[in-house]
Image: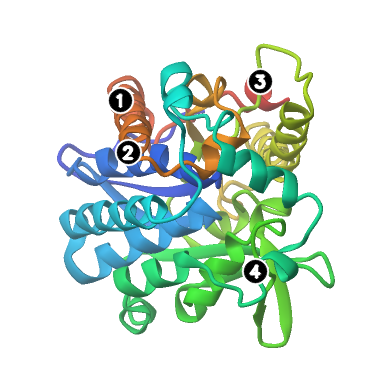
Amino acid sequence: MKSKTNTVGEKKKINLALQGGGSHGAFTWGVLDTLLADDRIEIEGISGTSAGAMNAVVTAYGLSIGGNECAREKLREFWSEISEAGQKGLLKPSALDKMLSIGNMDFSPNYLFYDFISKIFSPYELNPLNINPLRDVLAQTIDFDKLHESLACKLFIAATNVGNGRLRVFSNKDVSIDAVLASACLPFLFQAVEIEGQHYWDGGYIGNPPLFPLINETKSPDILIVQINPVNIDRMPKNAREILDRINTLSFNSSLMRELRAVKFVTDLIDNGELDKQKHKRVFVHTIEAEPIVQELGVSSKLNTDPEYLKYLFDSGKQLATDFLAKHFEKIGNESSTDIAARFM
């Protein structure tokens, strides 16, 4: 069911839903850079989890202080800082890794040692001082006080409450460095983040990313999901590392798939006349998927911040976003470009 086409020259408003996935978030950076460079598009709201939360916050901050070009520059600055911080650390691909894969670190002695020891000792034992380089990067990149005052776009960041298992969504006024770190807090890497007496882990366990804030709190019917956790894989995981990675991927996709099924259910009721379309919002769903890019990348690649690898992901995101706009731009505001039933059901 199509709606009225936008008038010529009118910007099309969209909402963005950004998944998490560690360094794979550089793919999303490429997507965002392309969208921000297109003056036909206006971003109304952004929902993000983990690396998606970081991309979302940096984008929202850039929009608030200088518009699209500033957002692009802030994203470049953020990912440059991430890469620089990573190069000072111990988790780097070996020469053999670079020969065999664009991003995996399966032959890196430091990664293999860390992967092994992190299954025996917790972050409270391995990192008792709770040092997190992401905190410094965020502090250098974003003035959170200015972000709180921003009306440039609506921002929603998801984290998982460890104690009660509920999803908490931080919005513009309460997004902080701690909220962003909570959204990206993988429990085998970092200590839980405490906010207002509650402890939080990565938001991907409950909402990766949550769609309901975009549906309820914005006017635009269009949600573009940047999905970096593959739904489908070509081969059966057989070693322990591959099995664990697939378990995490299934877990991190499950909440999104549930929400999309609910969107499909409501959409069908509206289209069949069983719900009043004047009272219920009809949502158009679009996706840009990193699946063809990340399928051959293992869990180690999510911790790889090598600049050449991040550029590869960035360029891949730009290309797929360019392809999406070429094929589906006219559908924005009019119809979904993703068949939810075929893709997720």
Real-space Cα distance between discs 3 and 4? 35 Å
User: How many numbered marks appear?
Assistant: 4
User: What residue would you read off at disc 3?
Assistant: 232
Amino acid on which the number 1 mark rests in the picture: Gln
**Secondary structure found at label 3:** loop
Q: Residues within 10 Å of mark 4 (few under 14, many from 20)?
A: some
Q: Answer left or right for 189 relative to 55.
A: right
Real-space Cα distance between discs 2 and 4? 32 Å
- Precedes in sequence: disc 3 or disc 2: 2
Q: Which mark is residue 319?
A: 1
Q: How crowded is mark 1: few (under 14 residues within 10 Å), some or many (20 or more)?
A: some
x 52%, y 68%: residue = 132
Q: How crowded is mark 2: few (under 14 residues within 10 Å), some or many (20 or more)?
A: many
Amino acid on which the number 3 mark rests in the picture: Asn
Q: Residue 30 carries which label?
A: 2
x 68%, y 69%: residue = 191
- Precedes in sequence: disc 2 or disc 4: 2
For this orientation, the residue located farthest to the front is 109
Q: Is residue 305 visible?
A: yes
**Which of the 4 image quarters holds residue 148?**
bottom left
**Which of the 4 image quarters holds residue 282?**
top right
Contact, mark 2 vs mark 1 (Cβ under 8 Å): yes
Real-space Cα distance between discs 3 and 2? 22 Å
Amino acid on which the number 4 mark rests in the picture: Asn
